[in-house]
Image (cartoon, rainbow, N blue to C red):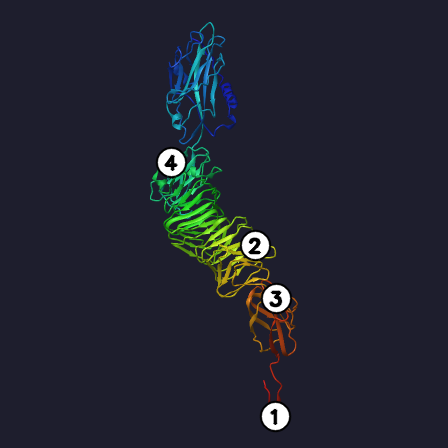
Amino acid sequence: MINIKPKNIFAVVAVVLVVFMLLPGAANISADTSGPNSPSTTADDSGVGIAPWADHANITASDNSPASAIIPAVDTITHYLKATNFGFSIPAGAIIDGIVVEWERRDADLGGANTKDNAVRIVKGGTIGSTDKASVSTWPASDAYATYGGSSDLWGETWTVDDINSSTFGAALSARNVTTTSSASPYVDHVRVTVYYTPGITIGGTVYTDEGTTNIGANKTVAVSVNGAAAAGTDDTDASGVYSITGITVVAGDVLTLYVDDETEKGVTVTVGTGSDMTNIHIFQNYLITRCDNSCSLSNANINTANNNGDTDIDAIYTGTTTITTAEGKSLYIPASHTFAPANPVSVGGSWTDVGTFSPGTSTVTFSATATGKTITTTGSSFNNLTFDGVGGGWAFQDNSTITATLTVTNGSLDANGTDITVANVSSSNANTRTIALGTGTWTLNGTDTVWTTATTTGLTLTESTSTIAITDTSSTSKTFAGGGKTYYNISITASGSGAVIFTGANTFNNFTINNPKTITFPASTTTTISGTFSCSGSSGNVITINSSSDGVAATLSKASGIVACNYLSLQDSAATGGATWRAGSNSTDVSGNTGWTFGTVAPPAPSGFNPATGSTIKTATPNITFTLDEDGDCKASTTNASYSAMSGTDCIGDGSSAGACSMASLGSNGSKTIYFACQDVDGNQDAADTTHSVTYTLSTSDSAAATMTLKGAGVFKGSGAVK
């Protein structure tokens, strides 16, 4: 019998601590550990070697009662000394980070140095693994723990909590005789195992029946799926609609699907996990919520992964692979501080609420609802391509929106709803039943080529309201407005640049404004009707060209009444009709084929309808005189006749309009007074001294006349004149 020396436990602890500090990754020790645990089951496993282990059950405790073997010859080895059933209870949902195995062993031969490790391996499911941690050092002559593995060492295996907690989890060791002349005597007193793990996380939030106002109440089951697998956990909501699912195995970057499970109500939230607890992961009934909690942007690929477990409760909200489609009546919501970057098409069967960030890339978002009452809220995010294609569907913008590519209305009703829409191109040219309500805001068309097409108007109802369409592109590429003969309210061509703006269709506009030098091409043999104003004044060096789409064939502009006063135009094949007076201005060029336009200097505005009327008696020396002009302009008034530029009298109010009012300075003493009015139009055509207009008044500032009175009788006066 060999006498084994007692071990110094403090030295052992010190050695273990030093070894741990030297282990790779020791600076990042996991948040939780279990162990060191000792085995309950041991065995001599003859899978290798020739030398059996005696008393193998002695390795369950460090008590100086070892298991032992005799290795008879050089380079021969022992069987495996196998230990299992370590009694771990790692909590559900934990992630196994690393395993440390410590074997307490020595070489019992005098002087030692006869034994080395042959194999040091892990046992999973009762099977000895293939990863070998054997050391090249000889065993010591006195008991000491040797440490294998580490806090982030998984021994070449993939581990679940069940693997570690199983009675078939353990470790195995085989020793080798390294002498040249004698046997070796390896002794093992104890084996212990420590498991490093990251606990399962908790995911919680509230289930609402709307966009975060009314909670769903108690006893609604919420499930979570990780990376599209079967539900990893569930919890029922409390009376406040709050759920909390614990013990979920999640690493940073995992795709998480939170959904209402096996209930009448449906709702899904998809996010990417952080690897730690997550709160306020809310679910809205009838919504797909797209969020990303790992400093990321959620993509269609993530959302596709989230729906790989085949649960019909998820399918009730959305489906899809490359294209993500929410079901009919199911809406999409992007929370604040979260980004949705689909990278592929998205189809929405309900409303769209974006209070976070939508990064559209080159994607197309299609609204496919077949019921009205759907809304679109963008909160500053833009769309790339935006399509409305739901038979019977109806959508209304809730805030100003930007579409960087094309807005297409294929089916259904779209209402701008008083918002401003900025878009490259608008297209609704088909025979389907559809409605576009332009609203009261501005539609800014900043694209090229066909910026607007409703060329095929079958089935189209267009409501212009008091909207403005602004064509703003500054490039040299032409822009086409294919209006389809519909009625629009105001249109404004505001951008400079050499690219022509081409109109097709017999369209009607309220106010038509050309603010910058452009070539404006109207459709040949077609009438464009103006019901309000037509403004088209260029400037020196910045001439506006108005022509026809076909050389030699006139394009007709029609305005029923009033005066159109333009300047600095180049006109070709333009027929101005309808009853209005069309003035091209003194600085315009009559190229060819024009009718109805007046070129050269024209008469300035003529005032009329003076109040007080000419010939009246006025009672104040500072009268306010109102009048109207036959075209927009402004006037001056004076008691001295002069041209507009020379007149130094009163500058009347109402500049640039057809209504004027002059508050005169003192006209002096009573008597006959003549007041002259000199005017100019918006193009600078002015009255000369011989073309002014005048009114004549009699100024009488006294309220009584002289009276002659004679006393006749008792207190009776008779006389001439008024007596007051």
Q: Which residue is mark 4?
A: 308
Q: Earlier in the sequence, mark 4 or mark 3?
A: 4
Q: Which mark is residue 338?
A: none
Looking at the image, do the residues carrying marks 4 and 3 touch, with CB atoms under 8 Å apart?
no
**In the rendered structure, which amino acid carries the disc numbered 2?**
Pro
For marks 1 and 4, give the one nearer the viewer: 4
Q: Position of residue 144 (x, y in %)?
A: 48, 16
Describe residue 374's horizontal placement relative to residue 657 as left or right. Answer: left
Give the structural element (helix, strand or loop) at label 2: loop
Tell me, for residue 686, which label it has, or none: 3
How far is the residue under mark 1 from the one under mark 4?
Answer: 119 Å
The crowd level at tag 3 (other Cα within 10 Å; few <14, some 14-19, many 20+) is many
Residue 324 visible in the shown view: yes
Q: CA distance from mark 1 to mark 2?
A: 84 Å
Q: Which sits in the foreground, 458 or 220?
A: 458
Distance from the alpha carbon under mark 4 to that under mark 3: 78 Å
- Secondary structure state at the residue bearing disc 3: loop
Kindly identify which residue carries mark 1.
711
Measured in 3D between alpha carbons, the distance from the residue under mark 3 to the one under mark 1, in whole angstroms, is 63 Å
Please state which of the two labelled residues, at mark 1 or mark 2, is closer to the viewer: 2
Q: Position of residue 405 (x, y in %)?
A: 47, 46
Q: How many marks?
A: 4
Q: Which of the 4 image quarters holds residue 126? A: top left
Amino acid type for the residue under numbered disc 4: Asn
Name the residue nearer the viewer: 574 or 200. Answer: 574
At a point 46% along the width and 50% down the height, the residue shown is 426
Residue 267, horizontal then vertical, whole percent: 38, 43
Q: Which residue is mark 2?
A: 517
Q: Is residue 402 left or right of residue 707?
A: left
